[in-house]
Amino acid sequence: MPNWNEVIIEIQQEQQKNPGVNPLDTVRRKYLKKVSEITGRNTIAYYSGWLQKPTAPGTAVGDKDKSGFMLGINKLDRSQGLDLILHTPGGDIAATESLVDYLYSMYGKDIRVIVPQISMSAGTMIAFASKEIVMGKHSNLGPIDPQMGGLACQAVLNEFEQAKEDIKRNPHSASLWQVIIGKYHPTFLGACKQAIEWSEKMVSDWLENNMCNGDKQKVQKIVGTFSNHSVQKSHARHISKKECVEVGLVISDLESNQDLQDAVLTTHHAFMHTFSNTHCVKIIENHIGIAYIEQAAPPSK
């Protein structure tokens, strides 16, 4: 299978061969179809271009994504299950819950997630809804601690607890803490607490009912590790396959099937080239070439 540079060459050759057809689409769909041929399963790629366009709107998980999945699933034989290739920074919790509910209604528990590079935050939550996650040595998941306004909810709650304890010990510190805590609006604490409870319950239910087969102790260990801001330190932390295995997730090695590894990574390269050379910010595409594509407006001159 072609590597990164060889995919570029193949795209250029395709453009010369069929100048009237978008070569990026042709090459990307060729290898996405190859993934499905190897596995014998339905394959949908859910890709965000946030790495190439970090400030562009539309890269995060949102409610519009369900339309893309409805389009992609429409003509597929659902008895073949679903392999979902994920590359996303995450996004809205409510949209994530709705999306997983929809996928369950279509495929039940027969959902496997493949992570070619990174699936962060809400993307990790989606992966936790599957029966199995396929990762390579280079693949990463991320913490699932909720964020509000760019702030980790648990860090906010910890800061309030620290303020309370500090003021008890040293009442003169109240004026200093007032400046720090005063930046939060009155209902912010409650909203942070609710977001944590919501996301943890959601993910716990998905894990218990599918990947962990009712093993509550394993569920608690996974959720406790991935949602603990004190352990992970940063919402942007990249959690390795080795750590995912150690905590109890059902992880398969992408490297165990050379043909699948080649097809998945070449597909990944093709998606990355698409984001780098177009205004696309998100693509939801199935193995028969049906795609939902969001584009960012080109920069004004």
Image: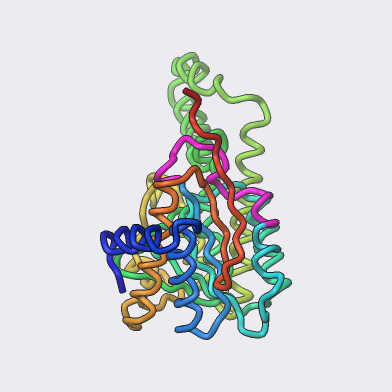
The x, y position of residue 274, in whole percent, is 43, 53
* Above or below, comparing residue 241 to residue 214 in the picture: above
**Side of 15 where 215 appears, left or right:** right
Q: Is residue 133 visible?
A: yes
Task: Give the magenta range.
Answer: 50-67
The x, y position of residue 76, in whole percent, is 66, 76
The x, y position of residue 86, in whole percent, is 49, 62
Q: Residue at x 44, y 39 (%)?
A: 54
**Magenta run includes residue 277:** no
Coloration of the structure image = rainbow
Of residues 274 and 150, which is closer to you in this image? 274
Q: Is residue 140 visible?
A: no
Q: How many numbered marks are there? A: 0
Residue 148, quarter of the rendered image: top right
Q: Residue at x 57, y 63 (%)?
A: 285
* Above or below, comparing residue 286 to residue 61 in the picture: below
Of residues 67 and 28, which is closer to you in this image? 28
**Magenta run includes residue 52:** yes
**Side of 34 where 290 appears, left or right:** right
Of residues 249 and 3, which is closer to you in this image? 3
User: Image quadrant for the N terminus?
Assistant: bottom left
Q: Residue at x 39, y 79 (%)?
A: 260
Q: Main secondary structure of the magenta part?
A: loop
